[in-house]
Image (tube, coloured by chain):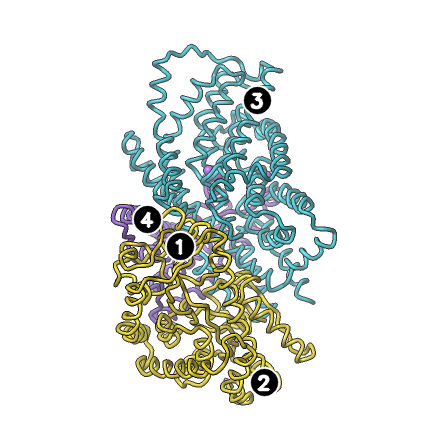
Chain colours: A purple, B cyan, C yellow
Amino acid sequence: MAALVDRALLLLARGLMFLAGLGLALMMIQTVADVVADNFWRRPIPGNLEVISVYHMVLVVFLPLAYVEWQHENIEVDLLWRLMPGWLQRAVLVLGYAVCVAFFAILARQTWFDAMKAMAKDEMMMGNVYVLIWPAKFVLPIGFAAICLVSLRHAVHAAIDPDFSPDPADPTEGHI
Amino acid sequence: MDNVAIGFLGLGAGVFLLLLRVQIGVALGLVSFIGIAVLLNMRAAWGIITAIPFNFVGDWNLTAIPMFLLMGFIASEAGLSAGVFRTMRLALSWLPGGLAVASVGASAVLAAASGSSVATSSAFARIATPEMLRYRYDPGLATGVIAAAGTLGSLIPPSILMVLYGYLAEVSVAKLFAAGVLPGILTAFAFTTMIVLRVLRTPALAPKVESDFTRAELIAGLRDTWALPVIILGVLLGIFLGVFTPTEAGAVGAALAIAVAALKGTLTRRVLGAGFRQTLISTASIFMVVVGTSLLGRFMALSGVPTYVADTFIEWGSSPLMVILAVSLLYLILGCFLDSIGILLLTMPIILPMAREAGLDLVWFGIILVKLLEIGLLTPPVGLNVYIIKGALGDRVSLTTIFRGVAWFVVVDLFVLAFLALVPGFTLWLPGLVD
Amino acid sequence: TASVWFPDTHPLTRDGYMELAKTLEETSGGDLTLKLYTGTSLLPPVAHLSGLTDGIVQMTYHAGTYTPSDLPEDNTLAALAIGLPNSMATALAVAEFYINDPAMQAMFERLGIVFLGSYATPQYVMMCAEEVRTLEQVAGKKLRMPSPVHAAWAESVGAVPVNVPSSEMFSGLEKGQLDCAINAANDLKSRSLWDVAKHTTLLGFGPYFAGWEYAMAQDAWADLTDAERRMLLDAMPSNIVHLVAAYFATSDEALAEADAHGVAVTEPADDLANSLRDFVANEVAEMAVATGEKLGAEDPAGLASRFRETYEKWEGLLKDVPADDYDAIAALFKAEVYDKVDASAYGL
Ligand code: NA
Ligand code: NA
């Protein structure tokens, strides 16, 4: 059962990562295309800037969250934690994951309502042209709900699995 | 209880959660959500959640962050930096401590193609350090130099930290980039000087390396090295000639890195996959901190803590030097525990008004902050660049040894910092020319 | 509490909000105070509407074009701006129209906010890296346009409308990614555009007035006493007239100092001016209606024509008052608009 849940979650996290990767590739390609169009034909692509900053940016930022959490690579401070005795470490871990679950649930709930409201009013953004932006707003609740589920999984494992390790696969990833 | 007290209580709760290993974005975000609910009401707290993540992230100026990250990760994953180290080594091995000096030079070159210090350090941790250890360099020097030279990644443009700072302080990123060049080069020279002097005094630190290479070897090395300079030159020229903006430069640089790697034949699916994966992981983690700290910023603004702190500070006198000293102290302390993005975003709401009040030039101030954050990457107990070396070398060198080796560079960094703080004109000369 | 995202030095903040806070403090003897958040420390610019409806602050400035889907009626009228040559008349007409027109009041009612005061920028002008005075010169130029309507005019004269973030306006002009920025002339000084845009053409592109200078959340407005609401309403006319005047002054000052920075300030050639006039006469009304329909406003045609009437009325009224006698304009504005508002009924 637990293994099945893990497989499903990992699949979800990887799927979202893949979509985020598409967003990243498009961000690069469209920006370069705009630079080329601007310099060769003096004609930048209308609405390109809005699409890149609203759609691709949101994909790149919010969809990888679940995978990052799966790998335990979110930025945190584990100095004090390392000094704690084993039983306290586990208790603190469970508590910490519970806090994450709560916060991501809050974000997922509110951004979901916001996205529904945006869809209801056909939300647009004004530049030189009007660009429809409500679909991008649905990316947030998806990303937040996914990381919420992964955090929940970690909370459960931290509580029941004595071998659970919160150490990142590569401790330096995710920092600059 | 008045608002300022609630603000400080919230900050305390945030720090408590941080110490309990809760990730930065969540700890600060949750505390702010609750804090705003207490200060105003639930409806306002939900409202802030609506207002922040989407509007803050969907911003054109910030697209430079994933793009510069991608450029740096592709460059290092595709091994474009290995050739640079080889050439630097051929050219500089006659110097005392030649391999270490070559590492500084190669790091400075990669720094110009990478926005991140961590990426710069990790690229050479696997290439240069083992070489130095093989030639029986002092382990402290062999590891310390890579950790320290890696910090050039954020000082020499492009720089993710500068993009973020410029965005928050409403300062031109182009000017910040220009302002980082001379301090970056100065730091590299200071490191080099220190290495040479140390090795002259204690030759055992860095035994002489056989340096009877032929002209043919140097040319072959150069031929292998063109990739990185092509990318760097392409990006710099493009910005300078107005072919694209600094924001677009990241995307052009990333595309260029992919194209160059393809030409060199080192672009595999693994390289692309790893480059994309690392970029996405870094971007998402960075922006989780951005979201959390910007929620905190709103909570702080509502509580009046920043004004309170600034007022208190002004009471003790807010001369520019005082501000710089106070901020340096704060950053050096925080630098021991927190990662650089966290420190920058956490402190901006409070120190930015102080810097404005004291009439500091915000471009110069930004460079000082970046320099301070870079020192934080080297100081124990949490020194990310040190961990990177440790991660790459495993059990061959102890953490203590690396920290000891790094200490020399931190001392040099402090001198450079003092110089930058006392002579703003040095930093501001280049951005002044850009105008 | 109130929030305006412009910095302390901007006329909409300095001469608007900061002055209003002072006036209220004086007239109420310190009972009615305004805690002001400036810049984006509290809310991002786009969120100055949701911040109001979510109860984060009680009063905001808001640029209406940032949230077109929430403010279809406001955006319909904003599309007419290019054809309004008198900025002062625009500001006054907006206040009268937004307070009295049923469609506008329905819009505010729907959002749960109460409109209190308007603003308008000085006429937008062209700040260019090279001379652009004639139709021939404008062809092929890359222009940063403030709205789709302005962009359509650019297309009609063979120019290329581009979208450059305001943060990149300076470097864009410097490096040639941009030939002209169409904006209020105070940007010459406040954004140092005079260092890179050496040619300013005084082709009047209309003001920007979308959204509001002052609006309050309904519940906060209802919590005030009748006397306090009256005090706020009475403070409006003089505050608005003087803030618009101060905005003019910053723009005029920038233009006056531009010469010393080597900027040539010129009138457009006839062919260019005519092209804009023809465009306004033939296309703009239709485009405004199309905007309204796209965003879901009811009867945008009626809305636009009613607003035009109000604007023309104010253009007429202002003919009888010296253009720089701001106290007289404020008195007229007060008598015509704010004195007629019932503080015990409006917005409740
Ligand atoms: Na760099
Ligand atoms: Na540290």
**Quadrant holding ligand 2?**
top right
Mark in front: 3 vs 4? 4
Q: Amino acid at mark 3?
A: Ile
Mark 1 or 2, nearer chain start:
1
Mark in front: 3 vs 1? 1
Which chain is indicated by disc 2? C
Q: Which residue is mark 2?
A: C230
Please check whether the numbered discs 1 and 2 fall on a single chain: yes
Mark in front: 1 vs 2? 1
User: Which secondary structure lies at badge 1?
Assistant: strand
Q: Which residue is mark 4?
A: A31
Q: For residue B195, which numbered disc appears in the image?
A: 3
CA gap, disc 4 and disc 2: 53 Å
Vertical side of B405 occupied by C293: above or below: below
For residue A90, side relative to residue A139 (left or right): right
Mark in front: 4 vs 1? 1
CA gap, disc 3 and disc 2: 75 Å
User: Can you see residue A7?
Assistant: no
CA gap, disc 1 and disc 2: 47 Å
Q: Are marks 3 and 4 in contact (CB under 8 Å)?
A: no
Give the percent coordinates (x, y) of residue B5. 68, 62
The residue located at (64%, 54%) in the rendering is B357
Which chain is indicated by disc 1? C
Mark in front: 4 vs 2? 2
Query: Could you classify mark 2 by the number of other residues whose Cα lies within 10 Å: few (under 14), some (14-19), or many (20 or more)?
Result: some
Q: Amino acid at mark 1?
A: His
Q: Which residue is mark 1?
A: C199
Please check whether the numbered discs 3 and 4 fall on a single chain: no
Q: Amino acid at mark 2?
A: Arg
CA gap, disc 4 and disc 1: 30 Å
